[in-house]
Image: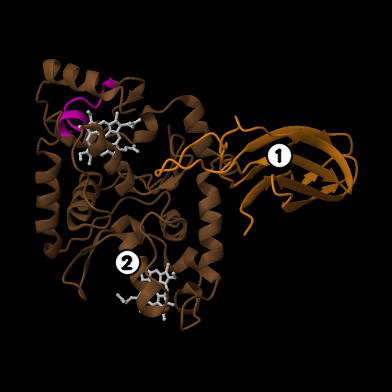
Chain colours: A orange, B brown
Amino acid sequence: MTRALVNVPKTAKRGDVIDVRAMIAHPMETGYRMGPNGVPIPRDIITRFECLYDGEIVFAAEFFPAMSANPFISFSTVATASGTLTFRWTDDAGKVETATAEIAVS
Amino acid sequence: MRARWPALGLALLAGGVAAGEIGPSERRSGRDFMSAETRAMQADDNSNPGMLWVLQGEQLWSDPAGSKNLSCASCHGEATESMKGVAARYPAFDDASGKPIDLAGRIARCRTERQGAEIPAREGDELVALTTYVAHQSRGLPVAPPADERLAPARAEGRRLFETRMGQLDLACASCHDDNWQGRLGGSAVTQAHPTGYPIYRLEWQAVGSLQRRMRGCMVGVRAEPFAYGSDAYVALEAYLMSRAAGMAMETPGVRP
C-alpha cells in the first residue's frame, strides 16, 4: 500500500512558479545497521524520485542511504498547462510507487 | 539519548527543587517547547510525516478485515463523524473487562471481537495507524476525561506512579515533568509531559509511536524496567496524564524530535 502525500496547487495562472511537495512512507533502511541478533538489516532505500508533468520529467532526484525515513521533497516548477503531475519513487528492488495530482491552469 | 541522561540525572538530583504540581494557567503543550522548525512541521499537514499514518489509518478504516469481513466503516460509518471527540475522553471505563481501557486497546478489541481478526501487535503499524487516525478526529477538541467515578482509582494509581522514584537514577516522572519542566536535558526540552499530541511522529523513531512508547523511553532513560505495553500501569499513567491535561487541545499527530 503506497502511503504518499503530495501537494500541488489546485489552480494556477500560466507561467506561475508553483511549489510542489511530496512525502512517502518508507523505512530508508541504510544497510549499515545490525538487527537485535547481530545480523545485518538488508539495505532497502528509494534510489530515485521523479515528477512528471503531463508525461515530461520536470524534477528528478537520486536518493542515498543518508536520507531519513519517510523522505520529504520540495521543489518548484512552472505551471504550463492543465494536467496531471505524476510522482514516482523507485526502490532498490526496482519497485515503483506512484501518486498523482491534478492542476488547472488558466 | 541514553548516554546523555546520566549526567542530567545528577544535575537534577543536585538542583532538584520540589516545585510540585503545575498550576492550570502554567500548563503548556509540548509543542510550545519545540523548535520553530518542528512546530512548522507539525502545523502543516503536507509536511507533517504523522499524516502518512493518518492516511494509512483512513485506508484501514474502510478495508474489510477478519473472519467477519467487516470494515470499521461497516459499523461506525464516517470516522469524521463517529470518532470525533472519542480520543479526547480516553482512557475510558470498559464494562466488559471491568477496568479502564486505552484507545489502542479499545480499537484492538473491535478488531478481534467485532471483525474477527488477529490480535494486532501493540506497537505494530496497523494498530498505531488506526489509533492515529481515530485520535486525529479529535484534533482541536479539548481533552475531556469522563466524569466516571470508576476511573478514579486508575487516575490515583497513575498519579502515584508519576510521583514515585524509579530506576537506577532514582527519579520520578514528576522530578522532571512537574519540578523541572522548564529545564533541558542535554539538547531536549523536558516539557510538562502532556499527552495531547499522541500518537506522535518522533524524528528519533522516524515513525509514529504511542504515548506508551514515549513513556517507555523515559523509563529506560532513568534505567527503570519499563512496564509491558498495554499493561494496567501504563493505562493508569495515561488516565492520570489525560486528567492533568483536561481542557487542553488535542493535536494528533504531534511532531517531536
Amino acid type indicated by mark 2: Arg
Position of B109 relative to B20 (above/below): below
Which span of residues is magenta-colored? B174-184
Res. B113 mark: none
B244 vs B17, left or right, is right
Position of B104 relative to B241 (above/below): below
Q: Which chain contains the residue that carries disc 2?
A: B
Q: Which residue position holds label 2?
A: B106
For the residue labelled by badge 1, is the local secondary structure a helix, a strand or a loop? strand
To which quarter of the image does residue B33 belong? top left
Residue in the picture at 52% in, 66% down: B60
* Percent position of residue A59, x then y: 81, 36
Position of B136 relative to B35 (above/below): below
Residue in the picture at 15% in, 49% down: B158
Residue B178 located within the stretch drawn in magenta:
yes
* Percent position of residue A55, x then y: 89, 48
Q: Which residue position holds label 1?
A: A47
Nearer to us in this view, A105 or A8: A8
Q: Quadrant of the N terminus of chain B?
A: top left
Residue in the picture at 38% in, 61% down: B121
Amino acid type indicated by mark 1: Thr
Nearer to us in this view, A16 or B67: B67
